[in-house]
Image (tube, rainbow, N blue to C red):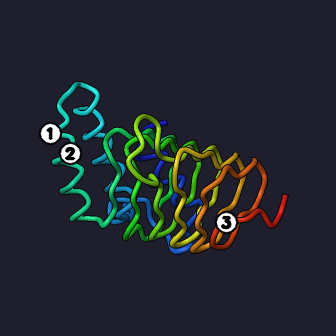
Amino acid sequence: MGFIREQIQSIKNNDPAFKRNIEVFLYPGFKAQYRFKIAKFFHNRGHQLIARYISEKTRKKTGIEIHPGAQIGKGLFIDHGMGVVIGETAIVGDNVTMYHGVTLGGTGKEKGKRHPTIEDNVFIGTGAKILGNITVGRNSKIGANAVILEDVPPNCTAVGVPGRITKK
């Protein structure tokens, strides 16, 4: 399935306000991911300056910052998007839903893998901060404004500051 069809399906599955397929081109999450793919192309070929330039222009246009080094799976749905940050070593699995203000970031000046891994079918609520080289297991939910600093097992719900498991 092509990227545009994949995004249309993802938006249909997640946004009841979506009416027509052509609307996909108006979604900031779509624009950011499309441009991310272009930046990733240059990043993977050693052209980091061009990749970062595209990434910065995208951030200014959409309010969504996805580092060209990140790994993004299929069907990522970023709703509204403003303030979303996905760090360089972040890994985002398939069919992840993410609302505005989400940060997949580091906790300092670590070297190597320093951003989270988000497995498949994860829901991340508005304003959540997931920080460090941790894993959020598949089918888990992260509550709005939660600050997650430790691994979240699969099929769990985590909320609060700092995040704690409330449902297994």
Estimate the spatial distance between the alpha carbons at disc 3 and disc 1, rounded to whole Å. Answer: 36 Å
The residue at the point 19 percent across, 48 percent down is: 54
The answer for how far apart the CA atoms under marks 3 and 2 are is 32 Å
Q: Which residue is mark 1?
A: 49
Q: Are marks 1 and 2 in contact (CB under 8 Å)?
A: yes
For the residues marked 1 and 2, what is the alpha-carbon distance in whole angstroms?
5 Å
Residue 138 point in image, percent of width and height: 70, 46
Q: Nearer the viewer, residue 107 or 9?
A: 107
Question: Which of pointers 3 and 2 lies earlier in the amino acid sequence?
Answer: 2
Q: Is residue 114 left or right of residue 22?
A: right
Residue drawn at (75%, 62%) of the image: 157
Task: Report x, y in % for residue 5.
Answer: 46, 46
Identify the residue at horizontal 46%, vertical 43% (top origin): 114
Q: Is residue 87 above or below residue 127?
A: above
Q: Say which amino acid is labelled 2.
A: Arg
The nearer-to-camera label among 3 and 2 is 3
Q: Nearer the viewer, residue 25 or 63?
A: 63
* CB under 8 Å between discs 3 and 2: no
Other residues around mark 2 within 10 Å, as few (<14) / some (14–19) / many (≥20): many
Q: Residues within 10 Å of mark 3 (few under 14, many from 20)?
A: many
The amino acid pointed to by label 3 is: Gly
Q: Residue at x 70, y 52 (%)?
A: 152
Which residue is at the front of the view, 82 or 25?
A: 82
Q: Which residue is mark 2?
A: 52
Q: Secondary structure at mark 3?
A: loop
Determine whether the residue tagged by mark 2 lies in a helix, strand or loop. helix
The residue labelled by disc 3 is: 163
- Please, what is the three-letter code of the amino acid marked with disc 1? Leu
| Residue 9 picture location, percent across and down | 53, 52
Q: Nearer the viewer, residue 75 or 21?
A: 75
Label tally = 3
> Outermost residue, right direction?
168
